[in-house]
Image: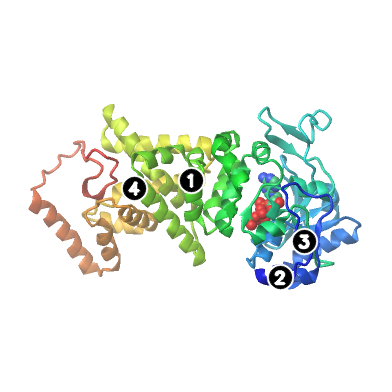
Amino acid sequence: MLKKLFKSLRSPLRRGKHPHSTPEVLSSSQHPINRGEISRYATSVVERLQHAGYQAYLVGGCVRDLLLDIDPKDFDVATSATPEQVRAEFRNARVIGRRFKLVHVHFGREIIEVATFRANHPEGDEEENSNLSSRNESGRILRDNVYGSLEDDAQRRDFTINALYYDPATERILDYANGVHDIRNHLIRLIGDPTQRYQEDPVRMLRAVRFAAKLDFDIEKHSAVPIYKLAPMLREIPSARLFEEVLKLFLAGYAEFTYELLVDYGLFGELFPASAAALKADPDYTDALIRNALISTDLRIQQKKTVTPAFLFAALLWPALPARVIKLQDRGMPAIPAMQEAAHELISEQCLRIAIPKRFTMPIREIWDMQERLPRRSGKRSDLLLENPRFRAGYDFLLLRESAGEQTGGLGDWWTAYQDASDSDRRGMIRDLSQEASGDAPRKRRRSGSKRKRAPGADGAPKPTARE
Ligand code: ATP
Ligand code: MG
């Protein structure tokens, strides 16, 4: 497909990182996109706007992905119509966003996102447009609703490969920033001055990594180098936006590679400071646990199975628990409350960076609590645990811990066998457990009301220690 695209590209390619005011135009015979591959809703939105007298194009990821023979995730439209004008054209449209106003046109479950052409607003211009655009003192764009021409719009987009415009009516592609050249060379390149563009919106650093992982492209040198220095700017980004970005990073099917790039560029520590500290303190275990979680996430996505962000965050944060538990124990707190308190602290701190919603923080805690309960299998406990709606996630998490090298005394295998066993075999397995326990050392009977002391790490309970 790529061959076809570039063999037929007759006009010489212009180089340079600054966008042109006249685009490179690729006619339908010079590129491989055909209208049939495009959502008919997206085409109809563009045509409707064009009939109403506005300019309108498909833009961004969908054009890029179609050129690379990848199924686009969604279809974005750019137009000269303002959000209000777009809304007036469609009954099924809603204006959304504040920092960046957009229109969502709904067709059943499919949403076509329509953005008005925007201009880069030079620093110092804010006063005139203060209700439309604003920046903070480090140059970060806080509001971005200054509209502009098609040429302006191309210039304010993030990467050259995302600044390609496709007109379904003429089937032509307009390339203002040598995006086709960079697609051919597998390069992620920011439009304009990289440092300034990252300062305007530090999330672009995450986007660079996301596209590099998704497309298996390199980040072009000048776009790559500033990331190491500017990574801490991510702290300025509202935690709710970072939550959305983190989901995009890890739920797109390329999580393992994305994680590697995030670590390499120093971005991982800005998103997950406690996990990055664990990665330093206990690199092999932490890396294995996170990596294995991401590999299985990627696999599930490939198999079109559901994935829950709770499991992912539970795994990303788990290696950061031990240090905290030990600290609390050193202050005299018993093992189990220390574990509970550490979990609470860790999640609260993480939420300052990435606003994980309650509907996910609760299950994270439940998955972790399950790690305390899975080793305790006597009497009716095992059957009760099996009925727990969180059992499956807890069991999968146990296997994940084992895959990273945690010693649990064969707990994972035991639960695997227990789930498949008949009723009478299950009874036998429980009996064996108590015999094993009494064979080693006769257990003292607990007097009712006596406090139970049990160190985490015993019998496959979470092992929060480098010191056991
Ligand atoms: P995908 O949807 O496959 O993740 P995409 O490139 O379509 O990738 P979107 O987040 O849907 O990404 O954004 C659509 C387009 O809007 C991008 O291609 C880019 O041109 C522009 N864009 C998005 N976010 C930014 C940003 N932070 N700065 C500049 N341009 C952006
Ligand atoms: Mg998109």
Give the quarter of the image for residue 202. Answer: top right
Mark identifier at residue 12 = 3
CA gap between label 3 and label 1 equals 36 Å
Type of amino acid at the residue the image marks with label 1? Asp
User: Regarding mark 3 in the picture, which secondary structure is present there?
Assistant: loop
Which is nearer the eye, 305 or 211? 211
Query: Residue 136: in sight, yes or no?
Result: yes
- Report the side of 13 relative to 265 (left or right): right
Q: Amino acid at mark 3?
A: Pro
Can you say whether 313 is above or below 307 in the image?
A: above
**Between discs 2 and 4, the one toward the N terminus:** 2
Taking the image as shown, residue 3 lies to the left or right of residue 311, namely: right
Q: CA distance from mark 1 to mark 2?
A: 35 Å
Mark positioned earlier in the residue sequence (3 or 2)? 2
The amino acid on which the numbered mark 2 sits, given as a three-letter code, is: Lys
Task: Give the mark nearest the N terminus, 1 or 4.
Answer: 1
SS for dot 2 = helix
Say whether residue 90 is visible: no
Rendering colour mode: rainbow
Residue found 39% across the figure and 42% down from its top:
279
Q: Crowdedness of circle 4 by 10 Å Cα count: few (<14), some, many (20+)?
A: few
Q: Position of residue 290 (x, y in %)?
A: 41, 50
Residue named by callout 2: 7
Circles 2 and 4: CB atoms closer than 8 Å: no
Distance CA(mark 3)–CA(mark 2): 12 Å
Camera-side mark, 3 or 1:
3
Q: Which residue is mark 1?
A: 264
